[in-house]
């Protein structure tokens, strides 16, 4: 491992790059404290091939079943063991009005055996949660400051040029376009 102060590294950059290419670690320091590491460029990783592990991985049908003692510790009923695979039976449609449940367990049993897909739009609306004032204010501020999507049409050569410039600056091309628009708006606002 080699450690060089930045001023020293400027003078020896070519030699330090050769050392990094050989696999040696080169640490750049500022006033004696490490701030960066110079490493050899390895190129992009090979593209991932979906399905390359097909047949090599096995997941137990009950991998996500919570053990009974843990469920009890959280005040829950343990889930029934599932056999895995898609549900083979069609659930009967739920009837309106929905029954009142005496416990979460009774609700879970009902929804495991009845489908609410057909009556979903007929269900009564739930009450909005009561939020702390600070959280409610924070959410409202975030919504007010949220960006709105717009649509613009650019020619392929304009998009290619924007992508090229953005890549040189290490930013996404859409971010670069937003920066240009914001810069233009600021410039025009000063003129007005």
Image (spheres, helix red, strand yellow):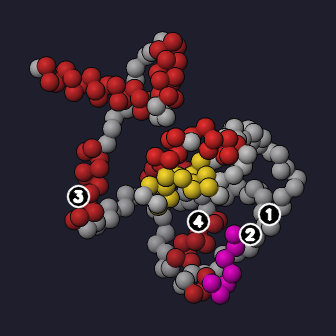
**Residue 68 magenta-drawn?**
yes
Q: Secondary structure at mark 2?
A: loop
| Label 2, label 1: how far apart the Cα atoms are | 7 Å
Can you identify the residue that label 3 sits on?
137
Observer-nearest of 57 and 112: 57
Q: Secondary structure at mark 4?
A: helix
Q: Nearer the viewer, mark 4 or mark 2?
A: 2
The N terminus appears in which quarter of the rendering?
bottom right
Is residue 11 visible in the rendered image? The answer is yes
Can you identify the residue that label 4 sits on?
111
Q: Quadrant of residue 65?
A: bottom right
The residue stretch that appears in magenta: 63-70
Can you identify the residue that label 1 sits on?
59
* CB-based contact (under 8 Å), mark 2 and mark 1: yes
Can you identify the residue that label 2 sits on?
63
| Label 4, label 2: how far apart the Cα atoms are | 22 Å
Residue 42, horizontal then vertical, whole percent: 70, 41
């Amino acid at each position: 491992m080699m450690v060089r102060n930045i001023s020293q590294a400027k003078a020896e950059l070519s030699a330090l790059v050769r050392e990094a290419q050989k696999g040696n670690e080169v640490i750049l320091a500022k006033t004696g404290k490490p701030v960066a590491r110079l490493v050899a460029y390895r190129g992009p990783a090979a593209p991932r091939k979906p399905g390359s592990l097909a047949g090599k991985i096995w997941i137990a049908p009950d991998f996500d079943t919570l053990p009974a003692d843990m469920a009890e510790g959280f005040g829950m009923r343990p889930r029934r063991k599932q056999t895995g695979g898609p549900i083979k039976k069609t659930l009967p449609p739920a009837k309106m009005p929905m029954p009142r449940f005496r416990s979460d367990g009774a609700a879970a049993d009902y929804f495991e055996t009845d489908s609410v897909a057909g009556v979903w739009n007929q269900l009564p609306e739930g009450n909005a949660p009561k939020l702390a004032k600070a959280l409610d204010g924070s959410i409202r501020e975030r919504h007010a400051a949220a960006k709105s999507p717009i649509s613009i049409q650019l020619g392929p050569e304009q998009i290619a040029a924007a992508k090229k410039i953005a890549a040189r600056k290490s930013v996404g091309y859409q971010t670069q376009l937003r920066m240009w628009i914001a810069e233009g708006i600021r410039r025009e606002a000063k003129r007005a």
